[in-house]
Amino acid sequence: MRYAARRTWPEKIKAWEYISEAEDMEAFALMFAEDKHLAADTEFVVIEKAGAESEIEFFKVSRTEPYALIAAEPRVESASNPAPAPAPAQSSSGGGLGFGRQGQPMDGGAEAIAGVWRAMFSNALFFGKVGATAMLIFVSAVFMAKWWFNAW
């Protein structure tokens, strides 16, 4: 199979930096780490180049002599907080907000609610314009039939 790989942490490479063929994804990941001489604790992603149903897996270099890899979780980083610390897990069985990975609430905050309201308002405005246009065309057709063709 054909696979592609790129580093995701500590430096994040945007383009696929290694494309090759291997028997399986783990063998390709090990080949990528050895060929690029990756340091310990470097994380990277490997994708299977098989079309729409491609597998994606994240790996971390656990040691370099000899190279060994472990599975890694994908990192979600922002510019203001480059390395989030794991928070204690909380259960969502209490009926309140559900908590996702690292204890972050899954509601999206005020920005998500504002986006929903904005979308609802823009949809209502769009359908109002469409309805007004349809009514204008219908009334115009009635008046044209009345005055131009003496329909009644």
Image: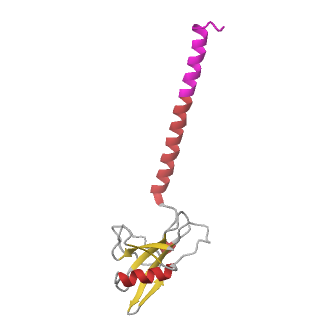
For the point 58% across and 8% down, which residue is it? 147
All told, the count of numbered labels is 0
Check residue 135 for magenta coloring: yes
| Residue nearer the viewer, 76 or 61 | 61
Toward the bottom, the furthest residue is 65
Residue 64 picture location, percent across and down: 37, 90
For the point 52% across and 64% down, which residue is it? 51
Residue 23 visible, this angle = yes
Residue 98 picture location, percent across and down: 56, 68
The C terminus, quarter of image: top right
Image quarter for residue 29? bottom left
For the point 40% across and 75% down, which residue is it? 84
Q: Is residue 40 above or below residue 118?
A: below
Side (left or right) of 67 relative to 101: left
Check residue 99 for magenta coloring: no
Residue 33 picture location, percent across and down: 39, 82
Toward the right, the furthest residue is 152
Q: Is residue 134 above or below residue 17?
A: above
Per the picture, the main secondary structure of the magenta-coloured stretch is helix
Part of the protein shown in magenta: 133-152
Residue 87 picture location, percent across and down: 46, 77
Residue 71 visible, this angle = no
